[in-house]
Image: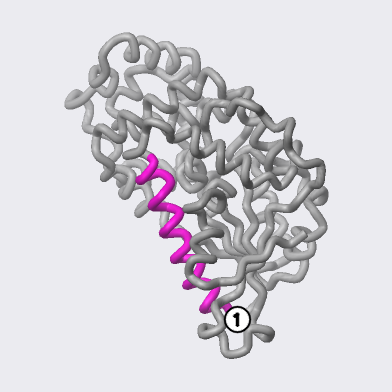
Amino acid sequence: MKMKNMKKSKTTLITILALALACTPAMAGGVQDRQAQVKSMLWRVSQPADDALDAAASPSAWLLGTLPFLNPENTPIDSLPAAVRNAMAVCGRIVFEADPALVKDGERMMKLIEQSGGIYPPGQYDVFDQFGEPFRSRLLNLTGQLGLPRRALSTFKPWLLAITLYGSLTIQAGYDPADTLDNAIYERALAESIPTDYLTDPLSELRRIDAMPVTAQKSLLIQIVREAFTFTGDVPLLIDAWKAGDLAYIARYQQDEWRGHSAAQRIMETEPKIEITRRLMRAIRGQDEDTLYVVTTTLLAGVDGVLELFRQNGWRVERVE
């Protein structure tokens, strides 16, 4: 039974990586000061004037921010704001940040993990022995509580163990990474014969993270273990913020998330924001039909987020209400 649970948690890795590890301690102040008006997490972006010969005639490009904890139960697809439902209805194509079909393909997932370099050969390494007390005991206790056998995890590099723990925490809290809002949008697109695509290559993303300095990997693991004590209470706050369209709250949440972990932040957040922005700009310049792009809200947020990077490059960014 424990091995079955561990394999299930591994299948969440790509989704969690693509969504930039939105796991942090709850911020002081909560969400009670949020404005009552609900806003959608949908933006329309337009190319700079010198890039588009006729901006008015250019196909529309929408950016929809989602979270890994949104699912058909807490966020039914037909309950989304009218602006989002309208964009889904009129778009000719939907492009996801990561391949939405991958999370349900366990065999392909395991091959990617093996190819990533995140697992050492048996007997050559023990991740738990890389840490002193008291953290080592806290780490062992957490893996035991989650039903993850020590022996199976011992050859994982710190970054892979961190993400496996995060996946297990997600499942334990009642959020299935294979049953998300992204997946619901994907299934709706398939049912309505709307073409889909995705922006990132999963193996390249895994190998990029695998190249992270060991000190940064350990920092990431320490952060995830810290998060375990507040995870269940934090997630509803993020969902509440998303439903209220409170991007500023999510940006502040990120700031708290990475405090004291700047090296890991650069790999797990800053670099993905820049790369996703580049990929989005390239895709939008090449699109020939109205397109909805579905990406993680945490990538959109902040002074260094995708929306701000678009503005800095002369693009027009408008929130769609």
Residue under the image location 51 percent in, 39 percent down? 254
Which kind of residue does numbered mark 1 sit on? Asp
Magenta span: helix, strand or loop, mainly? helix
Residue under the image location 29 percent in, 43 percent down? 210
Q: Is residue 68 magenta?
A: no
Give percent across and percent down for residue 202: 41, 52
Q: Quadrant of the C terminus?
A: bottom right
Residue under the image location 25 percent in, 32 percent down? 215
Q: Is residue 141 left or right of residue 167?
A: left
Give percent across and percent down for residue 150: 35, 17
Residue that mark 1 sits on? 288
Give the image quarter of residue 194.
bottom right
Residue 11's place in the image compared with 96, above or below, is above
- Judge whether residue 8 can be spotted in this image: no
Q: Find numbered disc 1 in the image and state the secondary structure of the residue it sits on.
A: loop
Give the image quarter of residue 152.
top left
Q: Is residue 273 magenta?
A: yes
Q: Nearer the viewer, residue 283 or 30?
A: 30
Q: Residues within 10 Å of mark 1 (few under 14, many from 20)?
A: few
Residue 126's place in the image compared with 212, above or below, is above
Extreme residue in the left direction: 124
Give percent across and percent down for residue 23: 52, 33
Snapshot colouring? one colour
Residue under the image location 28 percent in, 42 percent down? 212
- Judge whether residue 57 can be spotted in this image: yes
Number of marks drawn: 1
Q: Nearer the viewer, residue 285 or 91?
A: 285
Q: Which residues are magenta?
A: 265-287
Residue 124's place in the image compared with 88, above or below, is above
Q: Is residue 251 left or right of residue 124?
A: right
Residue 291's place in the image compared with 223, above or below, is below
Give percent across and percent down for residue 179: 65, 41
